[in-house]
Image (cartoon, rainbow, N blue to C red):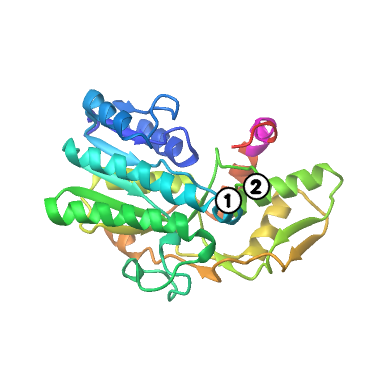
């Protein structure tokens, strides 16, 4: 298996780079990665040529257009169409070229906004989605269903992993497009550097969220590479959640910010709670390792080492 050619789509991103690192650490050496300049995954012709030339045996789809509530609200068409183009090209070419294993990465936002907690895989398509990110969610749902259809019709080893909220090194810290955890790290660090100015955060702080350190997701992907999973869809998370207010207080302490936190209740909270039921993958033998405080500390350390590039370049 360690000599098999593995293509990691999105290998430069937070998720893809963590997967690449985990594969290398485990002894996989025949890895293929292409930057978006080298290969535009939205372009069917380019993807077709890539598969013909490289002939990957395993494909891990960690490529996507991602962002937080603001980005999803402002660019609904791009979040829907670009993600569908990327995944459809990859899934279909993997199928047409008889790729042995395809691992599709999605998001917990595929589940209904008001689904019973914790979220089980079978809750998919049982209710309406959270309006602020439904465009991205619909794209990811179509990817899950495409992999399921290939599995059902052709008996191929195509599996979908749905991670909870991810964070870690190489995250997006741009305040206009980032998710809640990296945005808070950036906000609290900036405010501390300006003399502990007050920090304004969206919503009430009451919603509950679950967070998974990206290296733990990478280990789950490695687990899926090395094992034949019996079902098409698996949740990946910690099975534990905290309030956004608790998250803010934890990040405030880690960054050393001592100013006031102001909650702007005129801004949306999003889904009230999103906790994953991770029992299916746990029964197969996988579990997370990094607790939230340790993960945030590692992420903040990485941010401090790279913050100049994040303050100059919008991601």
Can the viewer see residue 286 in this picture? no
Magenta stretch containing residue 307, yes or no? yes
Mark 2 / mark 1, whichever is N-terminal: 1
* 77 w.r.t. 170: above or below: below
**Residue that label 1 marks:** 71
| Label 2: few (<14), some (14–19) or many (≥20) C-alpha neighbours in 10 Å | some
Q: Residue at x 79, y 47 (%)?
A: 191
The local secondary structure at tag 2 comes to: loop
The span picked out in magenta is: 303-310
The dot on residue 257 is none
Q: Residue at x 58, y 52 (%)?
A: 74
Residue 36 is left or right of residue 309, and the answer is: left
In the picture, which quadrant includes the C terminus?
top right
The one nearer the camera, 180 or 260, is: 180
Q: Residue at x 60, y 69 (%)?
A: 207
**Residue that label 2 marks:** 176
Residue 30 is left or right of residue 262, and the answer is: left
Q: Position of residue 17 (x, y in %)?
A: 45, 35
Residue contact between numbered discs 2 and 1, judged by CB atoms under 8 Å: yes
């Amino acid at each position: 298996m360690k000599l098999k050619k593995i293509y990691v789509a999105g290998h430069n991103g937070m998720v893809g780079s963590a997967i690449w690192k985990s594969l290398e650490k485990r002894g996989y050496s025949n890895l293929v990665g292409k930057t978006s300049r080298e290969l535009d995954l939205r372009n069917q012709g380019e993807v077709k040529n890539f598969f013909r030339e490289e002939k990957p045996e395993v494909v891990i789809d960690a490529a996507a257009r991602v962002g937080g509530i603001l980005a999803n609200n402002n660019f609904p068409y791009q979040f829907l169409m670009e993600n569908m183009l990327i995944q459809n090209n990859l899934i279909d070419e993997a199928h047409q070229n008889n790729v042995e294993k395809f691992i599709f990465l999605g998001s917990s936002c595929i589940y209904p906004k008001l689904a019973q907690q914790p979220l089980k895989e079978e809750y998919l398509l049982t209710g309406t989605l959270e309006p602020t990110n439904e465009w991205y969610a619909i794209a990811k749902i179509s990817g899950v269903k495409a992999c399921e259809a290939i599995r059902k019709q052709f008996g191929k080893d195509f599996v979908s992993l749905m991670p909870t909220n991810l964070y870690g090194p190489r995250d997006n810290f741009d305040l206009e497009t980032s998710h809640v955890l990296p945005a808070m790290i950036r906000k609290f660090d900036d405010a501390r550097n300006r003399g502990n100015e007050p920090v304004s955060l969206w919503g009430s702080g009451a919603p509950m969220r679950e967070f998974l350190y990206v290296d733990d997701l990478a280990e789950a992907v490695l687990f899926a590479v090395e094992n034949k999973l019996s079902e098409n869809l698996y949740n990946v998370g910690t099975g534990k959640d905290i309030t956004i207010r608790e998250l803010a207080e934890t990040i405030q302490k880690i960054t050393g910010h001592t100013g006031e936190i102001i909650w702007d209740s005129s801004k949306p909270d999003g889904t009230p709670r999103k906790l994953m039921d991770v029992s299916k993958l746990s029964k197969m033998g996988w579990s997370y390792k990094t607790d939230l405080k340790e993960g945030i500390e590692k992420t903040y350390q990485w941010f401090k080492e790279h913050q100049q590039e994040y303050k100059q370049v919008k991601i």
